[in-house]
Amino acid sequence: MARRRLLLFFFAYLGSLYYHKAYGIDVYTEKEHVTAREFEEAILSCIHKAKKVTNLRIEWKKVRSSGVSFVYYNRTFVGNFTGRAEMWNSNIRLKNVTRHDAGRYRCEISATTEQGQDAAETEVSLSVLVPPALPVCVVPSSAMSGTVIELQCKENEGFPPSKYRWYRNGIALLENRDSRRGKKGRVSYTMNTMTGTLLFNPVSNNDTGEYYCEAANGIGPPRKCSVKRMQVATCGLGVYYAQTKGYFSKRNSSVKKSSKSSTKQNENDFKHTKSFII
């Protein structure tokens, strides 16, 4: 009994193979993952093999997490694809690709066969290569020696995501160099090329200099932010340097001066009172 069921299943399987060979639609793509530079063209491949069919219908849709939207429907392009896309058989030639075109696309083909309605589909992903934008750099103008300081660099337009490199006084800093010794002493920093951070732990006087960051992703020329100077001062000279640069207001200075004078006056009053009692 089990053998008979197995034979029936086998013959049914062969029958289904014969049906798809003699009737219906096969749909596939020559390239599942398409990559194109921004503002150039891309071909989304969708090939179909139809046998003994009528009323062939082709539709293209863009698949998003929020839902599905039409690209090609009722033999015409819709939305922002109008005027910049054309159909080659069942393939799409997309001209002037933008970063907003990146995503997944589905080609759906249906037709009427002698056995009824049949349909098949395939999907293609499109990646759009975009050069980096001008990065934004955050560099403190002053820092106290011995503290932890982080410089930041970021740009959000490039694809693939940019990698970052920091420069000091026009010289590229080495990646992930936790500690090294130079002629002026020990320098400690960690550079993360993926996030764009440059961490000094701790920062020292030797880290004083002019900094800028460069973003690059291999698409177009690298972009760099404007040069910014970071001045590192020791603890004893830090207050004086901050005063000369105007980081302390005159009002705060006068308050401190007044407080110091008041303290001195109180000490004199105390000495005088003590002398009077004696």
Image: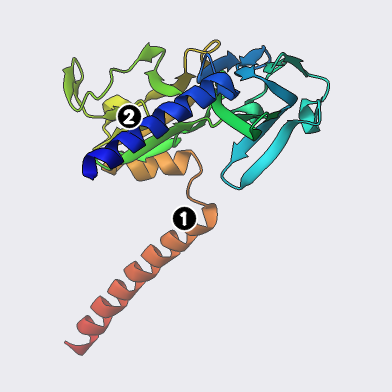
Residue at the outermost bottom position? 277
Percent across and percent down for residue 20 are 53, 24
Residue 110 got which mark? none
Q: What residue do we see at 62% from left, 46% from top?
A: 67
Percent across and percent down for residue 55 are 77, 27
The amino acid beneath tag 2 is Asn
Crowding near pointer 1: few (<14 within 10 Å), some, many (20+)? few
- Would you say residue 138 is visible in this rendering? yes
State the CA–CA distance, disc 2 to disc 1.
40 Å
Would residue 34 be found to the left or right of residue 256 on screen?
right
Percent across and percent down for residue 8 are 35, 37
The amino acid beneath tag 1 is Ser
> What residue does disc 2 label?
192
Would residue 134 be found to the left or right of residue 269 on screen?
right
Would residue 60 be found to the left or right of residue 9 on screen?
right
Instruction: Looking at the image, tell me whether mark 2 or mark 1 is earlier in sequence order.
Output: 2
